[in-house]
Image (cartoon, grey):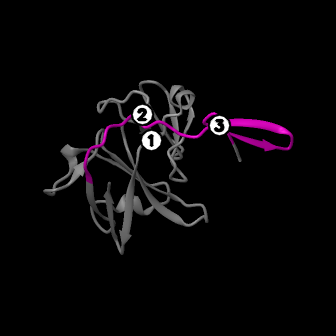
Amino acid sequence: MRKLLGFGLLTLAGIALACSDTIEMRIPVRPVNLELDLTYQDKALNAIQGWKIYRQKDVDQAGEYTGFGGVLVYHGLNTTGSDSFYAFDAACPYEASSSVTIEVDESAVYGVCPQCGSKFELLNGIGNPVEGPAAQERFQLKRYQTERTGNAIHVFN
């Protein structure tokens, strides 16, 4: 890939495609620390495409934090086709407001902002915008780290 004034240039079958080197993040940094139990309260996450949004008012343990707009935990697929758990800040990055959170659509593949209509890919855990003003501005979902140990998932930043 050649670099040209901060843009990547990729040629495929004679077609030149340009893409920005960075995707801007607009969601402010807030603490995230969740311990999820797949055998009890969070068992709905066991299914592929299972998901749940955690907000500060919903957590019941001291020391648990849910980021800026809540945490969307999603059970998707990684690049090898194996299942993986992903976590994103639930706030729409285009709106950048803690009160405007994405909703998972009926297919359970995309998150959609009810305010601006932006659509984000969830299944492969990237959170890239695919439609709407967030796609035009290249604002992806803010992603958090997940770590699975047995039937527990730790979500953190």
Q: Is residue 53 left or right of residue 131?
A: left
State which quadrant residue 27 falls in.
Answer: top left
C-alpha distance separating marks 2 and 3: 19 Å
Query: Which tag is nearer the camera, tag 3 or tag 1?
Result: 3
Mark 2 touches mark 1? (CB < 8 Å): yes
Q: Amino acid at mark 1?
A: Leu
> Which residue is tagged 3?
19
> Which residue is tagged 1?
141
* Upstream in sequence: badge 2 or badge 3: 3
Residue at 57 percent of width and 27 percent of height: 136
> Which residue is tagged 2?
93
List the single residue furthest toward the bottom. 150
- In the foreground, 14 or 54: 14
- In the foreground, 157 or 54: 157
Q: Amino acid at mark 3?
A: Cys
Is disc 2 placed on a helix, strand or loop? loop
Per the rendered image, the range of residues in magenta is 3-32
C-alpha distance separating marks 3 and 1: 18 Å
Is disc 1 placed on a helix, strand or loop? loop
